[in-house]
Amino acid sequence: MRWLVVVVVVAHGLIHLLGAAKGLGWAEVASLSRPVSPVMGLVWLGAALLVVAAGVLLAARAPGWWVLGATGLVVSQVLIMTSWGDAKAGTVANVVLLVAVGYGFASQGPTSFRAEYRRATTAALSRSLADAGAVVAESELAHLPAPVAEYVRRSGAVGQPRVASFRAAFHGRIRSDADGPWMTFSGEQVSTYGHELSRVFAMDATMHALPADVLHVFVGPAATMRVKLCSVVPIVNAAGPEMDRGETVTLFNDLCVLAPAALVDAPVVWQAVDDMHAHGTFTNGAQTVSADLTFDGKGDLVDFVSDDRLAASRDGSSFTPRRWSTPVGDYLPVDARRVATRGDARWHPSEPQSPYTYLEFNLDRITYNPATPRAPGQQLMTDQVGSGSRA
C-alpha cells in the first residue's frame, strides 16, 4: 500500500512540471489551455518539487515526511483550483496524498505513540545517566548462585561499566493465540535500572493487512499497554494491578536476558538450586514476582520460566494467570559483551491445551548506557548485533 501511494504521489508531482514547462517557456503544453505566467510557472515547479520530495521521503520512511507532504498538498490544490478546467483530475491524487498525510500525522505527529515513546525514553535515559558508574568487579558476583554468577561472567560484565540502561531494536512475529495468524513486527525498547526501573517498548505490527501501533510504558509503579489500528482506532487499552504484575515479570525477564550485568545489584533474592538452575524473586515497587532460570553446560541462560505473568484478553480488559517461558539462544558478541540474539515467548495453558509459542524475536541492535537519548528522526545509534562470530 505504501509503494502504491508513493507511485501515485511521485507521478502526481511530476505532472506539475507541465505547468512549469509552459510558464517558464520550456515547451508548448497543449493540454493546458489557459496561459501560465513565468511567476506561476515557478509556483508549479515548486509544487512539483514539494510533492515529489514528499513521495521520496515516504518511500524512505523518513520521519516527518508528512509535513512536506501537507505543504505540497496545499500548494498543489491551490494551483489546480486556478486551472480547474485543465487540472481538476489532479484532485484525485491529492485526495490520496491527503489520506497519506493524515496517516503520517496520526502515526508520527505530536499525539502519536511514536512521539510519546520519544518523550518517555528521553526522560528515562536522562534520569539514568547518573546511575552509570564504576565497572563491575569479580568480587560483586560472590553473592549470586554459581550458575547466575557464571552467566554474568560469560556476558562480559566483569571489567565493564555497570548497566544503567539499554536501547535495543528487534524484529520478529507475534500472534494472539495458538491458532491465530502470525503478524510481523519491528520494535524499539529502552529500559533503565539503578534508582528507577523502567521499560518503554514501541512496536510496529501488521494486523489483518493493516498497520498497528503498540506501546508499552512501565515507568514508576504503573504499566500500560495500548494498541491502535492504523494509528487512529484504539483496540487495546490495558492497565491495572494485573498489568503491573505481568509487566514486572517482563521487566525481570529483560534484566536477565538483555542486561545480565545489571543483575549484580538488582533487587533480586536468589535461591541456588543446582549447577544449571536458580530461582529468583524480583521486587519492583509493590510487585514481587519470581522465576526459574535454566542454564546450559557452557553457562549461558537458555530458559526463563515464571508463573506470575498473566495473559491478556484480545482487548486487554481481562487477564488470566498462566505459566510463561522465554527460551533464548544464539549468543553473539556486542562490543565487549555477549547477549542472546534470538528467543521465543511461550504460554503454557492448563491441560488438555498444549504450550505454544506466541512471539518470536530477533535482536537487531543494542547499546548499553547510551550517552544521549535518541532524537526524533535520528537513526538508532546502537551496536550492530553480529559483529563477531556466533558463540
Image: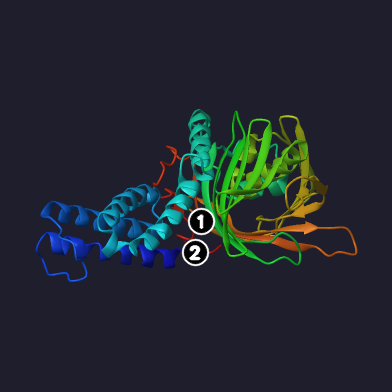
Residue placed most toward the observer, 171 or 329: 171
Residue 107 shown left or right of residue 39 in the figure: right
Q: Quadrant of residue 144?
A: top right
| Frontmost residue, 359 versus 275 | 359
Residue 232: percent from left, percent from top? 56, 49
Distance between the alpha carbons at the discs numbered 1 and 2: 7 Å
From the viewer's perspective, is 16 left or right of 361? left
Residue 389 numbered tag: 2
Q: Are marks 1 and 2 in contact (CB under 8 Å)?
A: yes
Q: Looking at the rendering, which quadrant does residue 268 occupy?
A: top right
Where residue 247 appears, x then y in whole percent?
70, 42
Q: Secondary structure at mark 2?
A: loop
Outermost residue on the left side: it is 25
Q: Residue at x 80, y 46 (%)?
A: 319
**Residue displayed at 51% across by 43% down:** 112
Q: Which residue is mark 1?
A: 333
